[in-house]
Image (tube, rainbow, N blue to C red):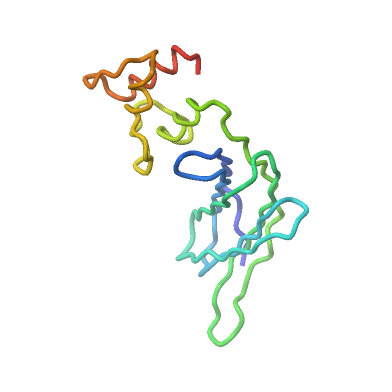
Amino acid sequence: MRAPTFSSVQASPQTLDFPNRITITFDVPACNFMQVLWGLKGSQPVQEKIDVSGSGPVGFTAEPTQPGSIYSFSAQACMNMPLAPAKCSPWTVAVDVKAVRNCHSLLKFYLQSFYGEHGLPGQPPSKNSPVPVRWLLAGSKFVPYDPSVPYYKRAASARAVLGI
């Protein structure tokens, strides 16, 4: 059995919806489950089991992570065997990922919380966010609240004025 391969890695800062985290996508061969070893580089790793049905991309999110710290990740694919121990691939070579620092600007934090990883205008705000975008911008001296203007245009205007 061949080991999983790392497809993508994304380190994300804390938002209103999520703690600081690292998301890794693996390309997994046909298997029943995979195991991920992860933890701060140089410390005892934690082993997580992920149930898999078939093959293809499988995502894993390590959270919460400490901003600025380096984490190591390794994985293996496994098949359950009837009346026998599972048959597993060798562990992958460890991949080190640095957790990103959190935002130090309250406005950037809110914009990232409302618009996701890349803060793109035109995307709807997070459904889990307890604070609506209009609340953030309604009290703004830069962009008065106007219900006829779509929220993403108001946020883009605030960005332009504040230079973010």
Question: On the rendered image, what quadrant is the N terminus found in?
Answer: bottom right
In this rendering, would 108 be left or right of 89? Answer: left
Q: Is residue 99 above or below residue 32?
A: above
Image coordinates for residue 119, horizontal then vertical, percent: 45, 29
Q: Residue furthest left?
A: 148
Quarter occupied by residue 144: top left
Q: Residue at x 55, y 73 (%)?
A: 79
Q: Residue at x 21, y 19 (%)?
A: 148
Q: 164 or 82: which is nearer to us? A: 164
Q: Is residue 48 above or below residue 143?
A: below
Q: Residue at x 68, y 48 (%)?
A: 71
In this rendering, would 124 be left or right of 52? Answer: left
Q: Residue furthest right?
A: 42
Q: 57 or 107: which is nearer to us? A: 107
Image coordinates for residue 54, horizontal then vertical, percent: 46, 64
In this rendering, would 38 be left or right of 81? Answer: right
Quarter occupied by residue 101: top right
In this rendering, would 116 be left or right of 148? Answer: right
Q: Residue furthest bottom?
A: 83
Q: Residue at x 35, y 31 (%)?
A: 123
Image coordinates for residue 117, horizontal then vertical, percent: 48, 35
Q: 49 or 136: which is nearer to us? A: 136
